[in-house]
Image: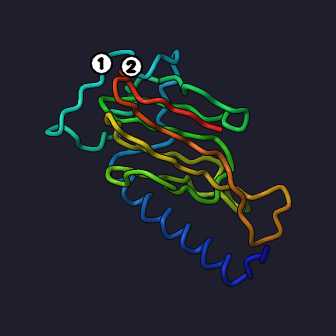
Amino acid sequence: MKRPNARGMSLFVGAALALGAYSLAHAQDAGVDAAATNDGEEKSIDFEPIVIDEKDSKTPKLADWQTATRVKITRRGPRAENCRAWRTRAWLKVHCDVRTTAVSLLGGAFKGISMWMRDPPAGSPSPESSEVVFPIRPGDRRIVEFFSFGETYGGSMVSPGIILQEYWLEGASAPTLVMY
């Protein structure tokens, strides 16, 4: 298997940073803030009926997330132990306190999705947290990846990180959220 060259990896990292900047701009417009924490008891995603109202499908504002309900991630692997989820109306926010170099939608609908990474601390090569916000609808299927530096990081490689799968199967009362 051929290893990617430094130029190819630079293009990948550059594209990931551009996507991060684009997503950050949209996340700020949407009022998304990773610092907003409502760390109460986790409830089931369908703690109350999820009302799908196409007329009221605007991205939640910061105030909405500050009062959002923390919800359980249906299934979680050990790498996702520092990830949390909140729900407001028919929207989910998943926040992970892990070193992140890029966040990418690998599959599923892009409409309404926002990805955000906090600025890295001084002297650090990457942010220490990231999040994704998206609408939830019956029939959804999404896969999002939080990339990170690998254990053998040498300056140009990023490694696969945490995977988030969200799907809402027909007949289910709410989506399933899996992170590993």
Q: Is residue 62 above or below residue 108?
A: above
Residue 33 place in picture, x, y as percent: 45, 43
Q: Which quadrant holds the N terminus?
A: bottom right
Q: Secondary structure at mark 2?
A: loop
- The disc labelled 2 sits on which kind of residue? Asp
| Foreground of the two, 137 or 33 | 137
Q: Residue at x 44, y 36 (%)?
A: 167
Q: How far across and down, in percent of the image, does residue 125 sit?
A: 71, 63
Q: Nearer the viewer, residue 168 or 134?
A: 168
User: In the rendered view of the protein, which quadrant contains the C terminus?
Assistant: top right
Give the percent coordinates (x, y) of residue 54.
17, 39
Picture disc at residue 46: 2
The amino acid type found where label 1 is placed reads: Pro
When the figure is inspected, residue 106 is found, relative to residue 11, above or below; the finding is above
Q: Is the residue marked by circle 2 packed among few (<14), some (14-19), or many (20+) residues within 10 Å?
A: some
Q: What residue lies at 58% left-to-right and 51% top-to-bottom?
A: 145
Q: Is residue 78 above or below residue 122?
A: above
- Residue at mark 2 to residue at mark 1: CA–CA distance: 6 Å
Is any part of residue 63 visible from this angle?
no
Q: Quadrant of residue 2?
A: bottom right
Element type where label 1 sits in the image: loop
Identify which residue, 39 or 137, lies in the foreground. 137
On the picture, is 44 further left or further right than 127? left
Task: Residue lying at the far right in this picture: please name it.
Answer: 152
Identity of the residue drawn at 66% across and 36% down = 80
Residue at numbered disc 1: 49
Say few, some or many: other residues with alpha carbon within 10 Å of mark 1 (under 14 / 14 to 19 / 20 or more). few
Q: Does the residue at mark 2 contact the one at mark 1 (Cβ under 8 Å)?
A: yes
